[in-house]
Amino acid sequence: MDDLFTVVDWSRWQFALTAMYHWLFVPLTIGLALIVAIMESIYVKTGKVKCLAMTKFWMLLFGINFAIGVATGIILEFEFGTNWSNYSWFVGDIFGAPLAIEGIVAFFMESTFIAVMFFGWKKFSPGFHLAATWLTAAGTALSALWILVANAWMQQPVGMEFDPAQMRNVMSDFVAVVTSGTAVAKFTHTVASAWTLAGVFVIGVSSWWILRRRNVELALDSIKVASWVGGAGILVTLATGDMSAVNVAKYQPMKLAAMEGLYRGSCGQELVGVALLNPDKKAGDDIEDPYLFDISIPYGLSFLANHDFNSFVPGINDLIDGIELTTEGDTIRTVSYAERIARGREAHEALRAYDAAIVAGDEVAKESALANLKVNYPYFGYGYLDSPEEAVPPVGMTFYAFRIMVMAGGYLLLLFVYAFIASYWRPKWLQHKVSCVIAMLSIAIVWICSQAGWITAEVGRQPWVIQDILPTRAAISDIAASSVITTFIMFAVVFTVLLVAEMSIMATQINKYSKEDINKIANS
Amino acid sequence: MTKPNRIVSLPVRIYRFYRDGFRSMTVGRYLWVLILVKLFILFFIFKLFFFPDLLKRDYSTDQERAAAVRMHLMEDQSSPR
């Protein structure tokens, strides 16, 4: 394992590549499914052919996206078994159970009802067909639920107990795993962001039609539906983003500090709006200014993190030193990172003592080791660290990704307000060339926003693969870097080809959908 | 004389539903080709040749797997005692 860090880095890059690629398709599937269900509901209610044409067109794009995206998530499971076998074993059924449920739900719900959606227009009653469309939409969101529950558990490990005999964690409370604050916030935030993404996609594609003076009525109607769904999506995303911030402040304070580039916190801590980080600033250093320049909102971070303008928000150095302040300014000692490392090593020693006691058949020593392990297990992962600074995530990437997400989200809110007003009261605005071009460019922005959110969440939680319990570098398998590099390159090639294939099929369908198609639907 | 109505069983009706659906596909044909190529690459190339489940491949019992992970996490990775 001489090349441990290379293996870890390449495996992380590979996982990031596959997860980010997978995430290109998933939010569009979730969001478009809802938009199509709403469009079909309007059709069933009004019986208007133009609504049917609208539904069928967006259902077609949904189908293309679904087909290209299907099974891309499987690769992540391959990687768990090969690159992250220690992790896979260590998390046991906690991670496996939600993924198994996801597989069953995805297979039975989506594959059954998608077939009815596409093949069943003339074979079932409109009501049954509509129900199938809604169930498909629900199925896509439910699939996401289980994946996000598994991800949330890694960020807030609850509902489990470590079994030293099996060397793995065992689920003790399924409900706690599914309903943890992080799981609820992550699911709602992610699904709402998917509605937002699909809303922008529909507005962008419709604007392209408007720009080309084709299917204008259908495009304007589509924008109306998209502005409702996307508008609701961005508002829920903002609200649940607040929920996420509170959870991060509580369970992953180091991530919050990295998101803000905050090294020394205070009561009434300001929220950094725009800033340039000082590259010379390092964890443990109290001399350098963290920012080269910044524009900040007074009391903003205290309110965001704790819903209290005067609350204390710890910075990176406060957390390392184990210092918090009361609102009166008194210092409270918390568990410093040096102490966490010591307790993590104590947990490792206890586990070794447990093993030795088992071999020796010494029940008393075994019970004593178990008790010691239980007390120190919350710090188990720190036992792998050599210094407190190792527990600090990459600040720059976390900080900038968070800002890109927030700024793009703010822009998208404005876009939906504009689209909503224009589609209902000022349709001429939507036919202006500049408006169309901006809407089309927004498709790229919403995807960047979505990916930046995941970068914030996943880079910000480093060095942990399971918060406080297992660092990423310990989770890796004993494999050669060269094999990971090979598969990384293969993935990059295959994914690029698939992405080009999807974009070209989708572009062809968007391009060729014409008045004749709409008439054909009307006469069918 | 009219032919008696035949009761078609559910599996047959499901089969016909999918058969007719697949036959009437247009863009879907290309998508299915793409899906099948993708699944082939994933399961018959990537999974078989590049992504073995290491613990399953190298150890035959859960006890051995636990011992291997214990060795890796407690001896190879853990900070020096």
Image: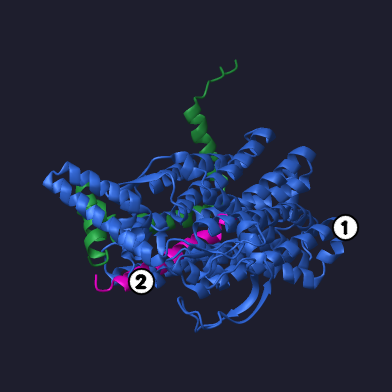
Chain colours: A blue, B green
- At label 2, the amino acid type is Ser
Q: Mark 1 lies on which chain?
A: A
Q: Residue at x 73, y 55 (%)?
A: A231
- At label 1, the amino acid type is Trp
Please say whether residue A457 is one of the residues in the magenta stretch.
no
* Front residue of A333 and A347: A333
Q: Residue furthest left?
A: A360
Q: Residue furthest top?
A: B1
- Earlier residue among tags 2 and 1: 2
Q: Which residues are drawn in magenta?
A: A1-27
Q: Position of residue A120 (x, y in %)?
A: 61, 38
Is residue A62 in view? no
Give the vertical position of A53 relative to A82 (above or below).
above
Quarter of the image that includes the C terminus of chain A: top right
Q: Rate crowding at label 1 as few (under 14), some (14 to 19) or many (20 or more) other CA atoms within 10 Å.
A: few
Mark 2 residue element: loop
Residue identifier under label 2: A387
Quadrant in the picture for residue A419: bottom right
> How many circles with numbers are drawn on the protein?
2
Left or right, A236 with respect to A471, comes to right
Left or right, A523 with respect to A311, comes to right
Q: Mark 2 lies on which chain?
A: A
Q: Is the magenta stretch mostly helix, strand or loop?
A: helix
- Label for residue A425? 1
Left or right, A360 with respect to A211, comes to left
